[in-house]
Amino acid sequence: MTRHFENKYIPLATFFKQSTNKEITLTFNEIEAIIGQGLPNAAYLSSSWWKKTKPPALHYLAWTDYGYSVKDVELGKSIHFQSVVHEKDERTADENDQKAILVIREAELEDARAFIKLQETIFSETDFMLYGKSDIQMTVQGIRKNFTSWKNEVNSILLLAIMNGQYAGYVQFTGGPAPRALHRASVVIGVKQEFSKKGIASSLMYHGEKWAKEVGISKLELTVIKENIKAQKLYEKLGFENEGSRKNALIINGHFVDEFHMGKII
């Protein structure tokens, strides 16, 4: 008989499924970032919750199914996992190195505060987003309201990229507002600079397109500032085509900038 753990632990299972590390240490905050929800009180109060390997609780399957066991527990701080499957690569120079593991998942209500910080960081790192760092005032209550709205809409979603337990980026798909436009969605994507060149944007778009096809979306649209050559090349690589431009679309640092409209049929 197949055993199933709670859905909240599926992203954690995805994390361990991808891992080839012999040993992994994750803080409680990193684990909660991966699953998008808080751990139960028992996880903070008892080491046995982590070392348990018998029903009725089945949360441990998230790591044991992929050959990992709990080696050490620092309650409220971190968990050290050890694999009986993956051997240590002797060529690795730093024993503390852990392979980067990326989890893409839908945003949960408890991600609201972290999402605000993620957006603020991204907005402050570039002049190429629609909003600047201080252009919008976001609140946890407001973001949670948006999350709830998106979850109730068939053709809108927010996906988060979590790398090694750190919020790294996001992609938002917003479906057409009218019945005749339900087949298309606008796309906004952002990745923190420290996680650039790690394939995160491509992975976000891959998962986003997969979701879009499942809900009947066949056209993706986005805008990119004319001077943002790097982003244009990425979108072209992902299959987007330039469909036109808008003159003086935005005012950034006191100067008018043009936007390109790009689209992709999926």
Image: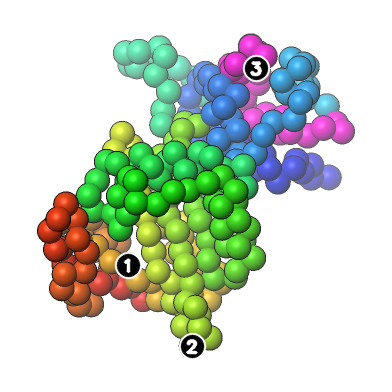
Report which residue position mark 3 lands on: 76
Residue 239: in sight, yes or no? no
Q: Which mark is residue 222?
A: 1
Q: Secondary structure at mark 1?
A: strand
Percent of width and height locating residue 39: 69, 31
Mark 3 Cα-neighbour bin, 10 Å: few <14, some 14–19, many ≥20: some
Percent of width and height locating residue 238: 30, 61
Residue at screen point 16% across, 52% down:
253
- The kind of residue tagged 1 is Leu
Percent of width and height locating residue 218: 44, 77
Asked whether disc 1 touches disc 3, contact meaning CB atoms under 8 Å apart, the reply is no
Residue at screen point 74% across, 33% down:
59
| Residue 105 versus residue 185 in the image, above or below | above
Between the residue at mark 2 and the residue at mark 1, the CA separation in whole angstroms equals 18 Å
- The kind of residue tagged 2 is Arg
Q: Secondary structure at mark 2?
A: helix
Is 248 left or right of 113, judged from the image as shown?
left
Q: Which mark is residue 180?
A: 2
When asked about the image quadrant of residue 150, the answer is bottom right
Asked whether disc 2 touches disc 1, contact meaning CB atoms under 8 Å apart, the reply is no
Q: Which region is colored magenta?
A: 55-80
Between the residue at mark 2 and the residue at mark 3, the CA separation in whole angstroms equals 51 Å
Residue at screen point 42% across, 55% down:
171
> Mark 2 or mark 1, which has the lower sequence index?
2
Compare residues 248 and 69 and report the one nearer the observer: 248
| Residue 61 versus residue 71 in the image, above or below | below
- The kind of residue tagged 3 is Gly
